[in-house]
Image (spheres, grey):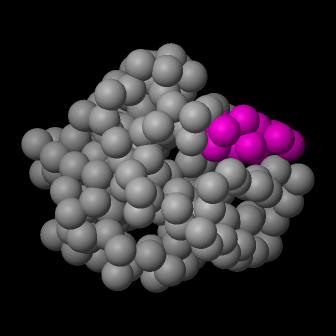
Amino acid sequence: MRIITGIARGIKLNTPEGEHTRPTAEKVKEAVFSAIHFDIHDRKVLDLFGGSGQLAFEALSRGAGKATIIDNDRNAVAIIKENAIKTKLMEKCVIINSDWKDFVKHAIDKYSLVFLDPPYKEGFLDEVLEKIYAAGILTDDAIVVCESGPDGVPVSPGVKDCKIYRYGRVHISIFRF
């Protein structure tokens, strides 16, 4: 797994070992960033289920302003910090070891680009989107990118535009608020 393009292009990222984290496949990541590439510059990013932080680091490498990366696993957070140092993007990151619900409940910032790549489970992304929307942490022009399995494709409240892409068993939903 590597950064595809931008200031950290080609840097290989570390990934947490075990089955707790499922990294986004490179072809899927490339497709996601092709779909949003004109809308990344200076955005404030939230990667709510960080894993290795690859989606946030790709966005930062391509010109996003700042990123907050959340994961509830301490080992994953350690890997995210290693990757932030490796990519030289640490100064643009806030890395937090927290449960996603606790983070959303207490978040004070607003985000304009949100990545949601949680464990695949039917209905889970709907719950996450509902809580994010209700918490008021999205800007008026927010883009939310969700990765899911075929049974977990979300429906989101308050969207102006929604596109769903399929890559084998992986579904990517891009919501524009």
66 sits to left or right of 107: left
Q: Quadrant of residue 52?
A: top left
Q: Which residues are magenta?
A: 120-130
Foreground residue among 111 and 171: 111
Q: Residue at x 76, y 53 (%)?
A: 154
Q: Residue at x 46, y 82 (%)?
A: 34
For the question of whether residue 88 can be seen, the reply is: yes
For the question of whether residue 52 can be seen, the reply is: no
**In the rendered image of this protein, does residue 5 appear above or below residue 76?**
below
Q: Position of residue 156 (x, y in %)?
A: 70, 53
**In the rendered image of this protein, does residue 159 appear above or below residue 89?**
below
Residue 98 lies in the magenta-colored region: no
Q: Position of residue 90 (x, y in %)?
A: 16, 42
Foreground residue among 124 and 161: 161
Foreground residue among 30 and 16: 30
Q: Residue at x 73, y 65 (%)?
A: 171
Q: Quadrant of residue 28?
A: bottom right
Q: Quadrant of the N terminus?
A: bottom left
Q: Residue at x 56, y 48 (%)?
A: 116
Q: Position of residue 141 (x, y in %)?
A: 41, 63
- Please tell me whether the stretch drawn in magenta is mainly helix, strand or loop: helix
